[in-house]
Image (cartoon, rainbow, N blue to C red):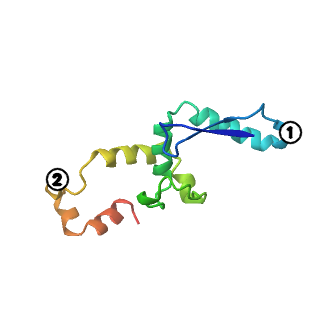
Amino acid sequence: MFRAKKHAYSEGGKKLSLARKPSFEALTVDEIAIVDAVAELYGHITPEDLGYLTKQMNTEIPLDSWGSNREASVDEDAFLRLSPDWHRLCAKIGAEDLDDRSRWSEPINDDPMEHFLRALNA
């Protein structure tokens, strides 16, 4: 159903395209609805941004394992990481130098983990 070609601009080095016209008889109505929803939500995203989004959603996969086609998590935590709030947090954290303790307040410097858990009401 798919044709794989070398693609110099992607992590995996392959570009997938349909080998022939898709047969929707193989999909249930619910599966077609899922495909449509995913295409609507993520179809506009560039391959690079989609790769970054995937990494944000699969935080359990170590950085050195990216590109090895490991199976992604599909549990409740993975579902929660679909939230736009999660992606805004990831973007903000990525732009900050979290190791610069001169920018930390006194409560954070005293016990960073306790402060973090208190901030999350955990």
Whole-percent x and y of residue 22? 78, 34
Query: Residue at the spot x=48%, y=44% of the render?
Result: 11
Nearer to us: label 1 or label 2: 1
Which of the image's four quarters has the C terminus?
A: bottom left
Question: Residue 99 or 69: which is nearer the viewer?
Answer: 69
* Residue 59 placement, left or right of 117: right
Above or below 55: residue 70: below
Q: What residue type is labelled 1?
A: Glu
Query: Residue at the spot x=46%, y=38% of the render?
Result: 48
Residue at the spot of label 2 = 103
Local secondary structure at mark 1: helix
Residue at the spot of label 1 = 25
Q: What residue type is labelled 2?
A: Arg
Density class for disc 1 (Cα within 10 Å; few <14, some 14-19, many ≥20) is few
Label 1 to label 2: alpha-carbon separation: 58 Å
Query: Residue at the spot x=39%, y=48% of the render?
Result: 90
